Image: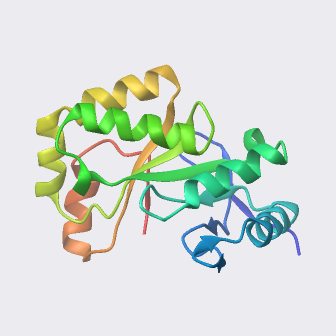
Amino acid sequence: LDMNYRNDKYGNPISVLGFGCMRFLRKQGKIDLQAAEEQILEAYRQGVNYYDTAYIYPGSEAALGQILEKNGIRRQVKIATKLPHYLIRNMQAMEKLFLEQLKRLPTDYVDYYLMHMLCDVDTWERMKAMGIEAWLEEKKKSGAIRQVGFSYHGNSDMFCKLVDAYDWDFCQI
C-alpha cells in the first residue's frame, strides 16, 4: 500500500491518514514508550507524516517529542498540537503554555497549531479580546507556528460561523 497525500493550504503534502497520539498504550499509568515508538515508527515507514497530540493528553506531547527526537525524524514529519483555550485567562498564560509545549515536544516550532475543541464563536471572541490574533500573527511571523486552525466537535451551523471568524489555515473535524 502506498500512502496518499493531499496538499495543505500552502502546498505541503500531508498524509491522508494521520496518527492520533491521544490513546498511546499505557503500563502502570504511564505511556508505554517502547510500544508508542514502535507504532510511530511503523506509521512513519508507511508514509504517515501527520502526528496529532494535545496539551491535555497526559504525557502525549512529551512521548511524541522524545520519540521523534530519538529517531531523528522531527523535520520529516508534521506535528499538530492544540491550545486548551478553556484553561487560558490571559496572554501571559498562553505564552507560558506554548513554551511548555515546545519544551515537551522538544522543537522550536509547531507545524499545525489548533484551538482545541473550539465549538462556538463566543469562545473565539473571548480569545480575540485577550489578543490572540496578534499573538498568532507574531508566532507565524517568527516561524514558531506554521499554520493555525481549530478542532471542531459541534454542529454545521456554528462550524460555518467559526470558519468565517478568522483566516484559518485548516480545521480538524
Outermost residue toward the front in this view:
28
Q: How many marks?
A: 0
Q: Residue at x 23, y 33 (%)?
A: 91
Instruction: Pinpoint residue 139: horizontal percent, then vertical percent.
Output: 42, 27
Q: Is residue 7 visible?
A: no
Q: Is residue 2 above or below residue 6?
A: below
Return the residue nearer the eye: 66 or 170. 66
Residue 42, above or below 67: below
Q: Position of residue 126 (x, y in %)?
A: 12, 47
| Residue at image coords 19%, 72% | 157
Quarter of the picture holding the C terminus: bottom left
State the quadrant of the N terminus.
Answer: bottom right
Give x and y (percent) for residue 30.
61, 70
Image position of 150 (left or right of 62): left
- Say if residue 95 shows up in the picture: yes
Q: Is residue 168 left or right of residue 160?
A: right
Residue at 83% across, 42% down: 72
Q: Say whether residue 77 is left or right of residue 166.
A: right
Where residue 119 appears, as percent x and y from the top left, is 24, 66
Residue 153's place in the image compared with 8, above or below, is below
Q: Please report the residue visible at 47 percent of the width from the left and 58 percent of the height from the top.
A: 54
* 170 in relation to 154, above or below: above
